[in-house]
Amino acid sequence: MKGLKERILNDVAQDLAAIEKALVENLNPYLPFVSHVAKYIMFSGGKRIRPLLMVLSARLCGYQGDYDKTLSVVFEYLHVATLLHDDVVDGAEVRRGNPVAHSIWGAPGTVLAGDFLLARSIAIAAQTDQIAILEILAHTTAQMSQGEIDQLLRRQDLSTDEEQYMEVIKRKTACLIQAACQTGALLARAPEDQVDALVHYGYHLGVAFQLVDDLLDYTADAQILGKATGTDLTEGKLTLPVIYALNRSTVEDRNRMETIIQQGTFTTREFDTILQLVTKYGGIEYTRKRAQEHIDQAKRYLRIFDVSETRRLLEDLADYVVVRQM
Amino acid sequence: MKGLKERILNDVAQDLAAIEKALVENLNPYLPFVSHVAKYIMFSGGKRIRPLLMVLSARLCGYQGDYDKTLSVVFEYLHVATLLHDDVVDGAEVRRGNPVAHSIWGAPGTVLAGDFLLARSIAIAAQTDQIAILEILAHTTAQMSQGEIDQLLRRQDLSTDEEQYMEVIKRKTACLIQAACQTGALLARAPEDQVDALVHYGYHLGVAFQLVDDLLDYTADAQILGKATGTDLTEGKLTLPVIYALNRSTVEDRNRMETIIQQGTFTTREFDTILQLVTKYGGIEYTRKRAQEHIDQAKRYLRIFDVSETRRLLEDLADYVVVRQM
């Protein structure tokens, strides 16, 4: 599957370069402090999946203008703004292998830099003169903060069920990825059926993306992932692998897991116990299966478009989401 | 001067009631948690000066529609979002006489509730279908976070001069008040000269408002103000009264003030020493004079409008800004 990643990276090399350029240019004239905080988190190994999806969605709908790269940065800025605020919220220490922003600049600077990125995003989107795009951004930002609040309120809540978990990931992750695809279509002034198709593609891709993220927190190589596995549980976040396992385990095994989870922190050995039980009760397999289903759905929605290099790229990106190792 | 306040309150009673209603209605369908945090800070004695200015500005420009009250809440929500994030930033303990939100709900919930209010504001503004209004909001939000960052970076910086201080208060306070007035004019589709006049009115009113706020932190009755005086200095904020005094004092008196300021915390007696020196070197008088000049300017810009009850109200509001005790 390494071939897939390399093929994608080769095909999007030019777009990625243009996106990187736009990410810097749209930030530079502003306060050095914000640029500094934002760049620290923004240029430390992000995958640019959101801007890329916007650019490719616009192209799939025949966009010929030159505002796509600029507008696409909005989806990275919003993502980074969320990361900055989340780092304060989560109390996480490491992100993408580096110390989190707030441990360097303090919570205040981190919160304000996030606010600034949000404001810049709206300003950039306003340049399109398309109110619909601004409405999407407003809706998305509201959903994302609601999702984060839900997650916060459910910390260590062992009664969280699959449906509640899905609500959270729809809001905190799928919504922004969906918005990126939808905005691409709107920028291209695509007909309604194409906009709808990309909304659904983005939604399913986004759900799968988060499912795999949550999975990797159990199964990944920490070296490749850039952070320790088991981080979600230490932060009190119950994700699908463990939710599924908790519901299917014997009372005895459930008690063993609950005791460890409620501790808040745990040893490598304790996490191994959790991982074994989660695997034993099918939590890993089930989550991977659900992710694959969403990817299949996502790709199905692309069928209304003619076969093209761009369509194939969007299909490849979907496939890559489930096989990625970080 | 108590008569002025009562006259204003009497004249705007109906508008204020409609604004209060809109503030609740536009929040209610959302997450109980956010409503809870937002309402705690929003319904604990705010003056609604920003929504009121928007409504009156629209009316002054002949607005006849029914979206003014709804749109006006944006300027209270943005203000409250800033307060929520500032409370985290400042480490303040008391706001309007009550414990600050983050000491009750924690920094994470407070940050996210602020994000949510920001998102709601953009959604409400998007309903106007006027991109120009969204551009103003984006610009304003960016300016406000820049202003807060500037202020943060200048904490306890004894070399801050009047010009740098003015830059901060333009961004963190005047910009939003200006935006409220400008948005009112735009909602009414007012001609350019009227929009400009209200931009300038709002700007000068906003500057005066913050100058008086900073003044009250030295001179107010803590009981009426709803928080202890001297809070700015304990938070490391150097405002005009002390900046002016520091620049005009003898080396000896400057050293006395600097020693106390650099401590971070100080006794009532030490604050009295600062207050005496600030008064002695004219910091109080100078700040009040500057505030009055800005109010005079603000009122001058209203002259292009015909005399009307609304114009008189906007003049009264300007006058009230300098005489208020809280």
Image (spheres, coloured by chain):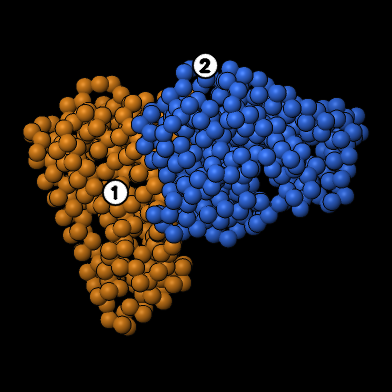
Chain colours: A orange, B blue
Q: Which secondary structure, mark 2?
A: helix
Q: Residues within 10 Å of mark 2 (few under 14, many from 20)?
A: few
Kindly check if marks 1 and 2 are in contact, taking CB atoms under 8 A apart as contact: no
Query: Compared to A280, does B287 lie above or below?
Result: above
Q: Residues within 10 Å of mark 1 (few under 14, many from 20)?
A: many
Which mark is nearer the camera, 1 or 2?
2
Residue that label 1 marks = A174
Q: Is residue B199 left or right of residue A314?
A: right
Identify the chain of the residue marked 1, using the numbered disc in the image: A
Q: Which secondary structure, mark 1?
A: helix
**Residue B302 placement: quadrant:** top right
As rendered, which of A107 and B111 lies closer to the eye? Answer: B111
Residue at point 11% right, 46% down? A300
Q: Which mark is residue B35?
A: none
Identify the chain of the residue marked 2, using the numbered disc in the image: B
Say whether residue A179 is visible.
Answer: yes
As rendered, which of B52 and B112 lies closer to the eye? Answer: B52
Counting from the top left corner in percent of width and height, residue A205 is at 22, 47
Residue type at numbered disc 2: Asp
Q: Is residue A316 left or right of residue B67?
A: left
Residue type at numbered disc 1: Ala
- Total numbered labels placed on residues in the image: 2
Q: Residue furthest front?
A: B308
Residue at point 57% right, 53% down? B43
Q: For the residues marked 1 and 2, what is the alpha-carbon distance in whole angstroms?
A: 45 Å
Same-chain check, marks 1 and 2:
no
As rendered, which of B180 and A272 lies closer to the eye? Answer: B180
Residue at point 41% right, 73% down? A260
